[in-house]
Amino acid sequence: MKRLVLILGSAALLLSGCSTENHSKPQVVTDNLPSGITLVEQHSDKANGDVSIPYSKYQLDNGLTVVLHEDHSDPLVHVDVTYHVGSAREEVGKSGFAHFFEHMMFQGSKNVEDDEHFKIITEAGGTMNGSTNSDRTNYYETVPANQLEKVLWLESDRMGFLLDTVTQEKFEIQRETVKNERGQSYDNQPYGLRSERNGESLYPVGHPYSWSTIGYVEDLDRVTVDDLKAFFKRWYGPNNAVLTIGGDIDKNKTLVWVQKYFGSIPKGPAVEDPKKRAVSLERDRYVTIEDQVYLPLIQLTYPTVYVRHPDEAPLDVLSDILGGGKTSLFYKNLVKDNHAVQAMVSHPCRELSCEFQLIALANPAKSTKLSDLQQRIEESLLEFETRGVSEDDLARTKASIESSTIFGLQSVSGKVSTLAANETFDSQPDLVQYDLNRYNNVTAQDVMRVYRKYIKGKAKVVLSIVPAGQTELVAKPQNFELPKREITTSTVGHKVEAPVIIDDFDRSIMPKAGPNPTVKVPEYQRTQFGNGIEMLTHSTDETPTVTLLLSLEGGPLLDPIEKAGLASFTAEMMNESTTSMTNEQMANELALLGSQISFSAGGRYTQIRVNSLVHNLDKTLELLKTKLFKPAFLSEDFNRIKQNLAQQLQQQLKNPSVLAARATDTLLYGQSNRISLPDSGNLSTLANIELEDIKAFYQQYYSPAMANLVIVGDIDQKQINKDIQFLIDWQGASYQIPPYQPFPEHHEPKIYLVDKPGAAQSVVRVVELALPYDASGQQFKSKLMNYPLGGMFNSRINLNLREDKGYTYGASSRFVGGKTLGRFQASADVKQENTGDSIKEFLTEIQRFSQNGMTQSELLSMRSAYTQADALSYETPSSKANFLNHLLTYDLDREYRDIQADVIENITLSELNDIARELLDIKRMQVIVVGDADKIKPQLTELGREVVEINVSK
């Protein structure tokens, strides 16, 4: 289920609540405010222990709603501007407008140069982005607290002063960028068209959810720049927006800035809340997609209610009982017996309607016929109807809701996003406790009632996705043809004028930042135990949570190459049954606590991660002790996981990005090295792994001898040592990590082509071996050097291939450094017809940068970005845990950040450019391309390099 998550198209936000009639309204008070701002209400922490987010809510005379939340725990602020417009406000024939305009909002405004938004925020040490879904579009920044006025200036400038700068040239470039995004995320991805086709089949023609957020290419091709401007003018007024600001703010100063920058923007046309659009089907609709996939997929979708409806919560609980993890009926009846590789149930809700989705990926080892899976799904529904709802079902759901809600409020951005969504859709920012209450009030009778009302015997959409040419595998032949879209809308036939705005200050002057905030590296305690474990702990009481990360060095590097994937497989088995508890019993106990324990193996480590609420930590650690020391290693678990892993590996071979990663590793490290294979191995090595190998790996390598432990949260040092006594007492032998075999030598630059017939795009990578990680030496400096080349949105590579040429949705370069290995990699997913052009531009940009280096302004930009970003580095318990784990991984002292700061401040332009000349030589770099060879090979042969076709599909 969605755990108090409102699914709105492509984004997830904390739930905005149900109907408002029973909400407890905060007290309305008065205050000394700038002219033009009215205080609507104030909401403080509740004294009765309820979970809440304190806020103050205001409204400007132009209708802009402002929500402020003070949190002085870290020197940062998060700003969110949410416009109540998404793809649901579009017209038939003009799909994709909301998302298209999200792109345009980053292309400069009257007082901000083209492509400067990202540059300004990056140089300020912050992050920014935007997102669009069916019901809203939002733009957000997290920056050091001293940069707040600058962010408000930026957001107000594009709210009020964008239209004059929307040119035909920008329009055409972003139109191509959106097409590239669609190609990368939809058309060239396995199952990428699933949600779009489901919406087309479930909703009637003209329903706002009958098309996807990204829209249709033919609609994007049809419209004009004035159509886009008219859409902005209709929906982007301040009276259709919510400005939410949270973090280390001075409320009075913030309101002065808000009025200064937003107050003069005139309100737009009046906006009414959209009407709910309930959907019903007269009979089952069977629909088929033939796709570049290996595993057939079936999805059953029932229309239900809409967000805020009283039946939403019990439907969410029903989805959890049916398909929420290892305690669910779907796991028992589909996954555990190997009929499905994956199976899940969810109830994604949007503003106008919700969908109850049941999804399963077929396991060809049992059957590839989706009719068999549909039968088992329907039998599971009948079993639920007979068995009913248990007390554990409800208790698990409520514990998970409590835990996920609290963990979701660990960051300022999480709290701001919650306030913004709730205000946008329910006109009341803090509904956290209200939502907790409505889920806690769900009864077994409620769940059974909604099952009978919305699921039992009701018509649905049954979507079958099968490998191309294998329609015999569908659940049933298609009986529903998508209605033809009747395009009745016309393009705007007049020039759209920008509003006239008069200010009493000069907007062309960017506000200066305040004094840099003081950023403190988290305090921690370091302890070395006699068994080899080194531990770092950090105590913080910001939320009643604890995060524990135990890392065992070696991981996949310890695999015999002929049994690559053994470490990963062993970790999967550690997530299964123990000698004292079945898989389902363990999952049930964890769910009742709202805790998580997961084992995984990747890169250089096997990792065990634990998340728990403080009041359940002792019970959670008891379960960790059981899982760590008493694995059952049952043959039935082994056989099921091995089958599932094999099917997943087959499916991965349909993904062009996976093929590119495999080709990169093979090319750089050679076939005689374990690291040339994926962490999970390949089909050949997986077949060699037996259950006794799993047991032997566990006995030899699950040892404290080379282990690191990080614990962050609301802890007492003395008490935590008692709580983890079982880890302190743990004994195990030391072991050695095998050395690498020699890597292959490449004496001339070539193009290595991986054929992916039918690929809609091409994946391009330019690669070379490089330095392993160091904290302040040559490898660290190489990342500083790469910053203007490909390390940020406004990098030379991205501006060239995305913004100037329109070849890709995004392009970048980076120096990746691990403990013993490193590489340089430049990459992009590009338009098929411009594959050769893209490679040429990549190599040209790299060569030009190598020869001429960065400029003085680029150096200053890099310094500013790296220096000020520390304010965002240690906010959440998770970020603090990652920082401490980084210290242990590379044996660093906390002062290493000071050393890095000194390097950044004092490194010269000439030194960085010398590093560029040394490390960036295109004659040493190999090019990897994954795409349709028949269509792109002629382009590649014109580039002056030998083209070598390779096969990595094993």
Image (cartoon, rainbow, N blue to C red):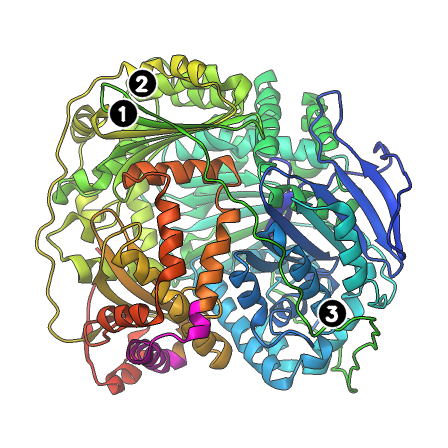
Q: Quadrant of residue 209?
A: bottom right
Residue that badge 3 annotates: 91
Residue displayed at 27% across by 81% down: 940
Determine the CA span between mark 2 and mark 1: 8 Å
Q: In which quarter of the image is residue 632?
A: top left
User: In this orientation, which residue lies closer to the viewer: 643 or 59?
Assistant: 59
- The N terminus lies in quadrant: top right
Q: Which of marks 3 and 1 is nearer the N terminus?
A: 3
User: In this orientation, which residue lies closer to the viewer: 740 or 874?
Assistant: 874
The picture places residue 96, in percent across and down from the top left corner, at 64, 68
Residue displayed at 65% across by 44% down: 247
- The amino acid on which the numbered mark 2 sits, given as a three-letter code, is Leu
155 left or right, relative to 854 = right
Q: Is residue 848 magenta?
A: yes
The reply to whether the C-beta atoms of the residues labelled 2 and 1 are less than 8 Å apart is: yes
Stretch in magenta: 833-859
- The amino acid on which the numbered mark 3 sits, given as a three-letter code, is Glu
User: In this orientation, which residue lies closer to the viewer: 97 or 613?
Assistant: 613
442 left or right, relative to 695 = right
Residue that badge 1 annotates: 533
Q: Residue 727 carries which label?
A: 2
Q: Does the magenta stretch include residue 794?
A: no
